[in-house]
Image (spheres, helix red, strand yellow):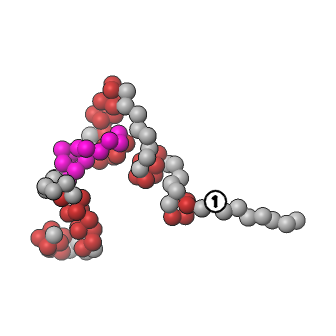
Amino acid sequence: IEQLYDIYQSEGLNVDIRHIILIADMMTKDGEVKSLSRIGVMKNKSSVIMRMAFEETMNILFYAAIQGMVDELKGVNENIIAGIPINQGTGNRDIRLRFRY
């Protein structure tokens, strides 16, 4: 983590250390270090849209179409990409105002 942080700093990039820690956690969550690539962290993602968003869009789309894969749009990222409001943050409430005329 410190080495990656130092690399960013040496390039004049100010990155919050928490972002680097989050990436490190994601790379090591299964007990081994995985690369941040299509054969590393993203390999086991079941969502077609998430894999398409990361790398090799056309290949993944072509393979998914041939296999008849369906994306259930269960994740937050998938819904954002598809333009579907998510049930979090400001999208968590259904507020209606009653006006009296």
The residue sitting at the left extreme is 3
- The residue located at (50%, 60%) in the rendering is 88
Residue depicted at x 52% and y 56%: 87
Q: Which residue is mark 1?
A: 94
Check the image and name the residue furthest to the front: 31
- Quarter-of-image position of residue 30: bottom left
Q: Nearer the viewer, residue 13 or 68?
A: 68
Tell me if I can see residue 12 in this picture: yes
Looking at the picture, how far across and down is residue 1, in whole percent? 16, 69
| Most common SS among magenta residues | loop
**Residue 71 placement (x, y as % from top left):** 41, 38
79 in relation to 18, above or below? above
> Start and end of the magenta stretch?
36-48
Q: Residue 57's spot in the image, x, y percent?
A: 31, 39
Which of the two residues, 89 or 61, is positioned nearer the viewer here? 89
Q: Crowding at label 1, few (<14), some or many (≥20) Cα neighbours within 10 Å?
A: few
Q: Is residue 16 rendered magenta in the image?
A: no
Residue under the point 11% across and 70% down: 3
The number of discs equals: 1
